[in-house]
Image (cartoon, rainbow, N blue to C red):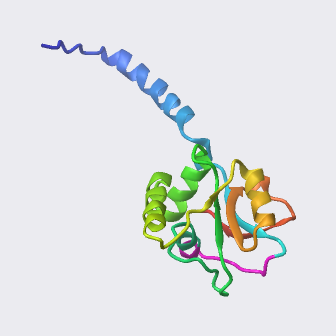
Amino acid sequence: MTKTVKMDPVRQRRLLPCCACAALLLFPLALLAEEVVVVDAHDPPVSLSQSQVRDVFLGRTTEYPDGTVAVPVDQPDSSPLREAFYLKVTNKSAAQARALWAKLYFTGRGVPPRQASSSDDVKKIIHSTQGAIGYIEKSALDNSLRVVFVVP
């Protein structure tokens, strides 16, 4: 049998602000970071909608609207930026997206996004791969990239 201990109401009121502060500190900073979806600056100009970006990163399409091949590039599995991107753009967690890609891969209908090790690696892959598309922090943006979608 367990014993229930009641907390003093004064102590309870004092504890609430502490818990709120702790929750804010633990909130992933990536959800607050501004993200952009980018391609190489030398690729043909294109602007994509959220649904078009979602379709590329969930394997629903392998082409841009102009018919050129789209090659998605993901941040590392452990990146909070990856989790935030998938939640904001696809309304799915990164794990759910990974499960969708596994199904596509094992049924022969798709190849998962190439995985980078960092935002700098995303940029390198975009520069070296025709049709590559990835997402990075807006602060990592430079002249060698073109923004095709700003993550809301």
Identity of the residue furthest to the right in this view: 143
Report whether residue 36 is seen: no
Q: Which of 50 and 116 is in front in this view?
A: 116
Position of 26 relative to 119 (above/below): above
- Name the foreground residue: 124 vs 146: 124
Q: Is residue 46 left or right of residue 74?
A: right
User: Measured along the vertical axis of the image, is residue 2 above or below residue 58?
Assistant: above
Who is closer to the viewer here, 85 or 107? 107
Q: Which quarter of the figure has residue 53?
A: bottom right
Name the residue nearer the viewer: 57 or 107: 107
Image quadrant containing the N terminus: top left
Does the magenta-highlighted stretch encompass residue 77? no
Q: What stretch is highlighted in magenta?
A: 43-52
| Residue 106 figure quarter | bottom left
Percent across and percent down for residue 117 are 69, 48
In the rendered view, tell whether residue 76 sits above or below residue 85.
Answer: above
Residue 143, given in percent of the width and then of the height, sits at 87, 64
Q: Number of callouts in the render?
A: 0
